[in-house]
Image (cartoon, helix red, strand yellow):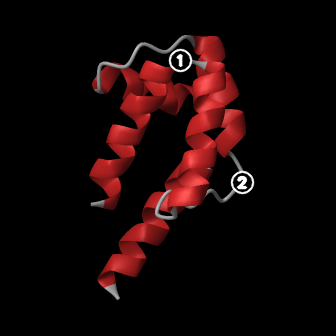
Amino acid sequence: MALILIQKIVLQRLNQMTANDLLRYAKQYGVSLTPNQAVEVAKLMNGKNVNIFNDAERNRLLKQVEAITSKQIAQTVNDLFNQFTS
């Protein structure tokens, strides 16, 4: 029950992520992200209810992130997602 609650909190937070949030997390985790990239990535996540606990949905989002940023940044984002989902 607690695991489901934690998952819902994480997913809700991702669903409401702003470009400024992304830039702050990028700085915190040493990810190179431009303001324009942050805006585009935030558009991918806002209101989309992407479930990063579902491999297919996470992979689809990561491919979109890679198209906006780079393969390296998408891999870093995946590594961060793995920390939240493990």
The structure residue drawn at horizontal position 40% and vertical position 77%, both measured from the top left corner, is 5
Question: Which residue occupies 30% across, 25% down?
Answer: 28
Counting other residues with Cα less than 10 Å from the Cα at mark 1, is it few (<14), some (14-19), or many (20 or more)? some
Q: What amino acid is labelled 2 in the image?
A: Lys
- Mark 2 closeness class: few <14, some 14–19, many ≥20 residues within 10 Å: few
Examine the rendering and report whether any part of residue 74 can be seen.
Answer: yes
Question: Residue 48, how many percent across, how many down?
Answer: 72, 54
Q: Quadrant of residue 25?
A: top left
Give the SS element for disc 2: loop
- 10 with respect to 79 (left or right): right
Q: Secondary structure at mark 1?
A: loop
Question: Does residue 17 show up?
Answer: no
Q: Is residue 70 above or below residue 21?
A: above
| Residue located at (49% from left, 15% from top) | 33
Indicate which disc residue 15 carries: none
Q: CA distance from mark 2 to mark 1?
A: 21 Å
Asked whether, in this view, residue 64 is left or right of residue 12, the answer is: right
Horizontal and vertical percent position of residue 72:
42, 20
Q: Residue furthest bottom?
A: 1
Q: Which residue is mark 2?
A: 48
Residue 74 location (% of width, % of height):
48, 29
- Front residue (pair 38, 66): 66
In the shown orientation, is residue 20 left or right of residue 75?
Answer: right
Which residue matches tag 1? 70
Q: Nearer the viewer, mark 2 or mark 1?
A: 1
Residue at left offset 33%, top offset 54%: 84
Q: Are marks 2 and 1 in contact (CB under 8 Å)?
A: no
Which image quadrant for residue 24? top left
Amino acid on which disc 1 is placed: Ser
Q: Quadrant of the C terminus?
A: bottom left
